[in-house]
Image (tube, rainbow, N blue to C red):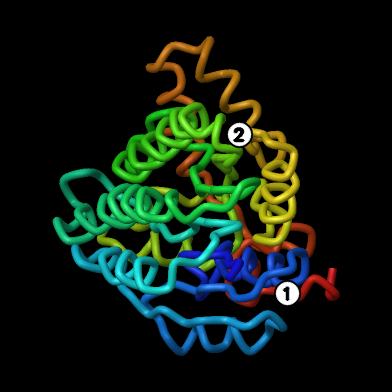
Amino acid sequence: MKIAIITGASSGIGREFALAIDKKYSLDCIWLISRRAEKLKETAALMQTKTEIIPVDLAQDNSYENIQNKLENEKPHIQLLVNAAGFGKFGGTVTISDEDAENMINVNIRALTMITKHCIPYMATGGHIINMASASAFVSLPHFGIYSATKSYVLQFSLALANELRNSCVGVTAVCPYWVASEFIPTAQDTPDGDDINNFMFITYPFTAVDKALCDSEKGKMLSLIGMIPKIIKCLSKIMPIHCQHLIWNCMRKITVQDSPQYPVQSLWQAQPDRSDL
């Protein structure tokens, strides 16, 4: 049985990966993983490929063990593994709750690592692993420090894994977008210091990121940079001193960008358009 596994498939980029993979690839089944079963059912209802809904909270210690047991029992051939589950929280390291800090590390690092580790033995020749990193993986971001650190891990882990698996014909791609229009932003703002970051210029739609990520994965690229901003950040991170990077970031993050017909910032993630609407 040839399958794809997608974490975070209930919304945002994970949901868009599920819809795109459903149309693009010939698979026997797609496993959709997220903590929100009802949202997974809504995603599955839009798909033609057979789906299996696996409602688990990846912040919990035993979540990936359930997935491991399912793999051992069914022994599928995994064509695609997309680790799209993840979240961030705005605010200083001290003001972010212990629970939020721990959950960011558990979901963004621990679950991604363990799910990948358990899936690799079932990866088919020519299979692909797509890990959602971030443009923040290239820099350290005050008031977004825990998140950016977790994404730095995802980036470095993915690049190392790509080298380890090169002889087994399994590709690994780390995807680095800038701001993406999804529930990510209002979730990140739901903290005591949620207004520490107000600037979401150059935001992109989830399907734009997903289309580029799948294309780069098929080309065998280890790194998928979504748009010009991640490319600029990557270059500047190599030549600009850390204190200058922090100075620019601290200035930019406090700029409030208001809604406009040309730049509907809030509505971008409050009401996601269909591809056909654009």
Looking at the image, is mark 1 or mark 2 earlier in the sequence?
A: 2
Q: Is mark 1 on a helix, strand or loop?
A: loop
Q: Mark 2 points at which residue?
A: 223
Rendering quarter of residue 161: top left
Q: Disc 1 designates what residue?
A: 273
Closer to the observer: label 1 or label 2?
2
Q: Nearer the viewer, residue 169 or 238?
A: 169
Residue at position x 40%, y 25% in the image: 246
102 with respect to 111 (left or right): left
Name the foreground residue: 198 vs 222.
Answer: 222
Q: Is residue 204 above or below residue 145?
A: below
Name the amino acid type tagged 1: Pro
Task: Give the x, y percent position of residue 87.
Answer: 39, 58
- Residue 71: image location, x then y, percent: 39, 67
The 10 Å Cα crowd at callout 1, few under 14, some 14 to 19, many 20 or more, is few
Which element is circle 2 on?
strand
Left or right? Give the position of 17 relative to 92.
Answer: right
Identify the image quadrant of the N terminus.
Answer: bottom right
Label 1, label 2: how far apart the Cα atoms are? 27 Å
The spot of residue 211 in percent (x, y) is 74, 54
